[in-house]
Image (spheres, helix red, strand yellow):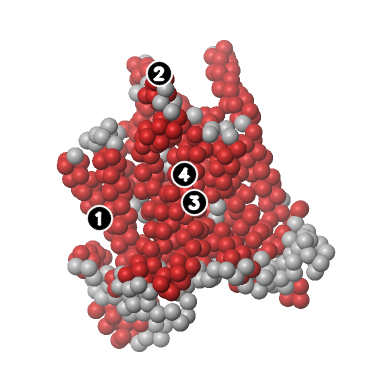
Amino acid sequence: MKEYILKRLAMLIVVLFGVSIITFVLVRAAPGDPAIHFAGQHASVEVLERIREKYHLNDPIYVQYYIWVKMALQGDLGRSIESRELVTTEIMDRLPTTLELSLVAIIIASIFGTVAGILSAVRQYSAVDYSVMFGALFGVSMPVFWLGLMMLFIFGVKLGVLPVGGRLSVGIDLERITGMYVLDSILTGNWKALTDSIRHLILPSVALATIPMATIARMTRSSMLEVLRQDYIRTERAKGLSERVVIYKHAIKNALIPVITVIGMNVGLLMGGAVLTETIFTLPGLGKYIADAILAYDYPVIQGFTIFFATAFVMINLMTDLIYVYIDPRIKYR
Amino acid sequence: MTEDTEVTEVKRRTRFQDITRQLRKNKSAMFGLTMMLTIVILCVGAPLFAPHGPHDSDLSRGLKPGFWSDDYLPGYYLGTDYLGRDLLARILYGGRVTLSVGFVALGFAVTMGIIMGMSSGYFGGWVDNVVMRIVDILFAFPALLLALVVAGTLGRGIDKAMLAIGIVYTPQMARVVRGAVLIIKETEYIEAEHAIGSSTLRIIFKHVLPNSLAPIIVYSTLMLATAILDAAALGFLGVGAQAPSPEWGLALSISRKYLVGGAWWAATFPGVAILLSVISLNLLGDGLRDALDPRLMGGAKL
């Protein structure tokens, strides 16, 4: 086990090295002169030269790469061209929004996905099964941005029962502790802010949860069906154990093991969805941050965000795999 | 000689017939196939089916509702967008863009994925190591995010979107192919080919590739579904197709401004078009999976 973790960590370094090269080359290969991007169209030759000097743009590309990696390892990912703020500061400012949104979404997706999957497996070929599978088919095929817009139109515009965007209504104050508003309002005992922030979270988190919910439901169903075919389940039934004990005490536990990997895989995929969801509901999170940076050709942000995000994503995947080994002793990694 | 070719031909036909028979029995897969073909025919033949041109604008008929309303403008069945362009025409023409981004990206991914997966699985050793590390690196990004970053740095436009999505799906296809090859490589008939001294290329192209087609076809279909979703998502975010293209994601993005005013149709129907295309491919893909059962071939998880 220890060996496996070490091997994975070594692989992690290889992957991050590759990721850093890819991002660096991509951004450098992008059209346009970065100095002009930074100084603006009308900068004088001297100013441009000073910027090139300051940011080592005149050095050979491997020197530039070396300087960038050295700074990145010290936690300095450069400054945004648009806002002139440090990229790390901006990422940290926006991280809680995305974290809160994704956490709520993955919780919704896991609960409803597994329950739906179990129900449809236990009653295979019933009306429940067919409607769950039909719903899951829609879920995996759903363009998130369209679903978000439709929900926004129905609940926000037509019915007017939920806010159409943002994180808090105007006029509601909340002390920022973690940056996750639901948590902050509980910590400060601010109940008005709690209900308000939850109301703002409902539409985006449900929209974001749709696809993972559908994949989790499908995975749970097939895993559960697989388990129910096993010999030990047949033995238990033959022993005369009640169906409830067989399913709830034995089958579900084993069926959920592969589901955990699927949930782990979805944590990363949520990030792609977060770009769309945050854009639709104007949430100031990482997804909107990268989308805006790309539209503005803000290269330091694109570069910094990509390397930050890839690191986080690879770590999440590693953690999922480790949890998997931990809960399923049958799996031995070399 | 003639006898020989006849024998292989008969064999191939029966295998093919076997699969089509299986597939034909699967109602939802046939439904998906029919729906996809209908969508493709409607979009390719857009000039024949669309009652108006996709760019015929007239501000005086802007944001008119379709057949369901009293305010319906005859001939504009699904209503008009903010510039008064016929929504039905724009959806049919837009499908050409969205679907071709999906198809071209998939074609790229399948070609590259087969080359990478085939060499990695068949030769093993350092080739496998190098290819799989590249795959690992590309897997360090969620698909849409990588596509967004690649498309964002390459610049705007559908050609960039095609390339970006193609790059994103390459590692997935490489894994699928590699998984299949690893199993086929160990089978006895490949061993027999080695024993009679067949060349590596002959073994790969005559035996390994044809036998790994099942998982490739299944996963291509399912990947095409998500590639189309991503194509529309890039358009929606503004890095794919550019105005005045009728691309579905872009059309949706532009029309969302008018939702608040109650003009829901302009943002709704392009989304329905995306949803229907993706559903039809998912139905077909699931059906193909049941018919071809790539699990026997070691298909990778997606």
Chain designation of label 1: A
Kind of element beneath mark 2: helix
Between residues A7 and A94, which one lies in front from this camera angle?
A94
What crowding class fits label 3: few (fewer than 14 Cα within 10 Å), some (14-19), or many (20 or more)? many
Callouts 3 and 4 on one subunit: yes
Q: Amino acid at mark 4?
A: Val
The residue pinned by badge 1 equals A17
Relative side of B199 to B31, left or right: left
Question: Can you tell which of label 1 and label 4 is closer to the viewer?
Answer: 4
Res A211 label = 3
In the picture as drawn, the residue positioned furthest to the top comes out as B3
Q: Are marks 3 and 2 in contact (CB under 8 Å)?
A: no
* Quadrant holding the C terminus of chain A: top left
The quadrant of the picture occupied by the N terminus of chain A is: top left
Q: Which residue is mark 2?
A: B189
- Residue A233 percent across, percent down from the top left: 40, 26
Q: Nearer the viewer, mark 3 or mark 2?
A: 3
Sequence order check, earlier mark of 1 and 4: 1
Q: Position of residue A266 (x, y in %)?
A: 40, 50
Separation (CA) of disc 3 from disc 4? 15 Å
Which three-letter amino acid code belongs to the residue tagged 3?
Ile
Amino acid type indicated by mark 1? Phe
Q: In this rendering, does residue A87 appear at all?
A: no
Residue matched to label 4:
A115
Mark 3 vs mark 2, CA separation in Å: 42 Å
State which quadrant residue B144 falls in.
bottom left
Q: CA distance from mark 2 to mark 1?
A: 41 Å
Q: Residues within 10 Å of mark 1 (few under 14, many from 20)?
A: some
Quarter holding residue A63? bottom left
Q: Secondary structure at mark 3?
A: helix
Viewer can see residue A197: yes
